[in-house]
Amino acid sequence: MNIGILSIGNEVVKGRTVNTNASEISKAMIENGHQVKYIVTCMDIPEDICDSLRFLMERSDVIITSGGLGPTVDDLTIRAISECLNVKLVINGDVEQELRKRYGELGLDFTEERKKMAFMPEGAEPIKNLYGTAPGIFMKHNEKLIFSTPGVPREMRGMLAQILKILGKGNLNYISRDMKVFGIMESTIAPLEREIMEKFQNKISIKSHPESMEFKDPVLTIEFYGYATGSDLEREIEDAMDMVRQHVIRLGGRLDEKQKS
Amino acid sequence: MNIGILSIGNEVVKGRTVNTNASEISKAMIENGHQVKYIVTCMDIPEDICDSLRFLMERSDVIITSGGLGPTVDDLTIRAISECLNVKLVINGDVEQELRKRYGELGLDFTEERKKMAFMPEGAEPIKNLYGTAPGIFMKHNEKLIFSTPGVPREMRGMLAQILKILGKGNLNYISRDMKVFGIMESTIAPLEREIMEKFQNKISIKSHPESMEFKDPVLTIEFYGYATGSDLEREIEDAMDMVRQHVIRLGGRLDEKQKS
């Protein structure tokens, strides 16, 4: 499945909160055989949420949102999705009962703010919040699957396994290996990277991440990765890495390797 | 100015690299009186870069991209922007001369990969890369300003002051204060948040960030913020915070405050 991620929250747009949620969602999806195409971050404004959702729905099969599910006035995601897709907002009886019970046990009223967390687009199913209060939602709309998770990282994280259970395993086997190279400029290795990618018909991507200055003791982390459908990719990545290793040694550089999946 | 940020790179979409660049760019812009509206992250695919750029150009005055400026085969940002906006890609004589000189001093050939970094859309101006090789670019297109910076954080960071010099100061004075609250649920504080925001006619936003579970020793960081054009906001935020302080104490909660700008 091709996945789009929508991060909702003024704090993320403002840079107050670094968007670790999107990275975690993306990693979890890729490790389970799916692909991620776009990540959009927008403010807590229903029109912006709708705009972003539409952009992603036109480009992906699955949308995973995070942020904006709680009891406060800026938690607008569910309402925004309902209005955007023109689906009625209805109260989910099971969620309402559960929330009413949890607050009731503490002797607290079931206020409008608390009840708000039981509303979801008609036809949507709740996703259990293992580490918080507001449930996530899962819905189908025009052949697209939409999941909404909270913005609090541990609450979002607690929903990933449930989302992956619904999505199932994808058919892509993501393989990634790292190689650290000292003393070779990125621009020196660039032609070989192109050559290798052509040799392997672009099944392997090679990406050099400079970790220092090109002109002064260059250090590169070179990533070799690809999405295998068959069984050859692992060996091909090993071959590609060998070509780079030999080239680096020939040019007088040094190597230091670690594995990254 | 209303700013859109475009983060370009498979490593960001895949979650390998957490998008700290977008946060840093956003913070720098907001601290200088501008507003940030959307952050889009896309892969190193020219069509996706173009798609994202169009989305942002329809919604913002200024676009700041990061990533994809280097010498390697996956550094496609400049070409993608040129093709997307239908602007010819031309070599910048000054940049070419500078790069030729720097590589020449090391006795290195001025290869195609190195020369590539001197190309930019016709009419664009280079932005000096203080900590690396590939220059950034600045261009105007249909009343929009587009800045492109590298993906390597220190190289991007080295361009922020130059970008802000071109943009100038914005007219918004962003003010933000934090208050930490112990022992009060987010759903308990929610009605007061709404009430205060209404009282101040939505000039002040109040956002509670839960740092633990609602039902078990709740801890909230409550952020009070706004964009002032006049001089009243600071005082109004202080008033709003007082209202919350009193409410928290009345309900038996505890306070711990720090300042965040």
Image (spheres, coloured by chain):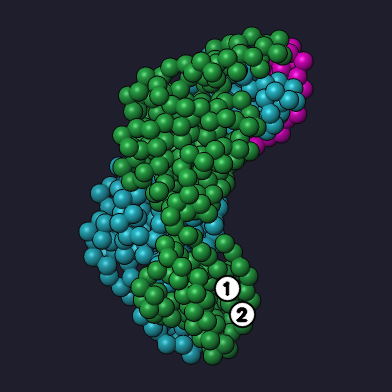
Chain colours: A cyan, B green
Read off the chain for label 1: B
Marks 1 and 2 close (CB-CB < 8 Å): yes
Give, as a single range, the part of the protein colored magenta.
Answer: A241-261
Q: Is residue A135 above or below residue A34?
A: below
Tell me, yes or no, whether the highlighted magenta stretch contains residue A260. Answer: yes
Percent coordinates x, y for residue B102 in the rendering: 66, 17
Q: Amino acid at mark 1?
A: Met
Compared to residue A127, the image places residue A52 above or below, namely above
- Left or right of residue A243: residue A71: left
Q: Quadrant of the N terminus of chain A?
A: top left
**Letter of the chain that mark 2 sits on in the rendering:** B
Residue A55 on image: x %, y %: 32, 45
State the residue at coordinates (64%, 9%).
B109
Q: Of the numbered discs in the image, which one, if any, rests on residue B179?
A: 1
Name the residue beneath numbered marker 2: B255
> In which quarter of the view is residue B254 placed?
bottom right
Q: Is residue B1 magenta?
A: no
Q: Quadrant of the C terminus of chain A?
A: top right
Number of numbered discs present? 2
